[in-house]
Image: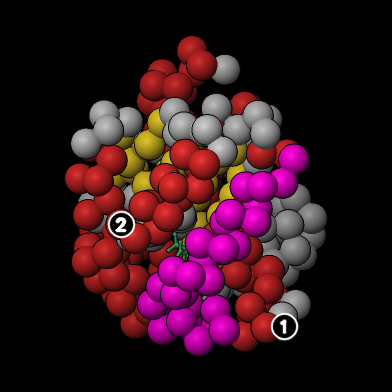
Amino acid sequence: MRIILLGPPGAGKGTQAERITNDFKIPHISTGDIFRYNIKNNTELGKLAKQYIDKGLLVPDAVTNKIVEDRLSKDDCKNGFLLDGYPRNVSQAESLEKFLANENLKIDHVLNIIVDRDSLVERLSGRRVCPSCGATYHVVTKPPKIEGICDKCGEKLIQRTDDNIESVLKRLEVYEDETKPLIEYYSKTNLIRNIDGNKPVNEVYNDIQALIGDDK
Ligand code: ADP
Ligand code: ADP
Ligand code: ZN
């Protein structure tokens, strides 16, 4: 099964991706996670990506497309994959389409998670993440058992450097201008399904399962 998760920053893509990829035993490919891993390890890619990410801007397409192609070429993607946060503009979608066509592969589902703007700002401002295992929390709606500490691995939680209000507002603007046009792009192929992401995490997941569940 090959899935693309679309939606604005804070829609819950990462949260739902974790559950889908566990259930369907497919790799979770998040371009944001790949960039953050590289930033943490101070690689050349990390140094480049950081300049864009901290401003809330997209990392250039040529760089991003290459990373995704390399990742999709790995053996563990043979039985499917879930893309979270890629493609993020029409040019990336076209690049992905070309790559997949070359490999004789097709996307099965594009899930578009819709959340109202005020909730997005609240979700991103309250998001806390574990720098060690990647688990995601929220100070109000999903607090860890012990404040500031990861339930899963005991590491100290952090706030992403781009989850400050200035970057959040910029990212929402970039989403409107560059990512939203993808909804129309994928509507043409009849692949896209809207998901009401305002509901609680479990209900959103049930709705997703209802759409893709039979394909397992
Ligand atoms: P994205 O990957 O789309 O940016 P995340 O999955 O990281 O979004 O979620 C953003 C924040 O919102 C996190 O703090 C997460 O705990 C919280 N969140 C995710 N889904 C929901 C939901 N359905 N209801 C309330 N809060 C949610
Ligand atoms: P969120 O869902 O909260 O926006 P992500 O982890 O998906 O967070 O992305 C964080 C940042 O990484 C983005 O704001 C952008 O700077 C960069 N990024 C992630 N994916 C892409 C992509 N496909 N193209 C360009 N930049 C990207
Ligand atoms: Zn952890």
Determine whether, in the image, residue 155 is placed left or right of residue 55.
right
Query: Mark 1 = which residue?
Result: 42
From this view, report whether residue 164 is shown above or below residue 9: below
Main secondary-structure element of the magenta-colored stretch? helix
Extreme residue in the top direction: 214
Q: Is residue 189 magenta?
A: no
Image point 38% across, 25% down: which residue? Answer: 207
Q: Tag 2 or tag 1, which sits nearer the N-term?
A: 1
Disc 1 vs disc 2: Cβ atoms closer than 8 Å? no
Quarter occupied by the N terminus:
top right
- Residue 52 belongs to the span the image colors magenta: yes
Q: Position of residue 58 (x, y in %)?
A: 41, 73
Residue indicated by mark 2: 90
Tell me the residue at 39%/77% (across/down): 56
Identify the element where label 2 is drawn. Answer: helix
Q: Relative to residue 40, is residue 198 depicted above or below? A: above
Observer-nearest residue: 145 or 28? 28
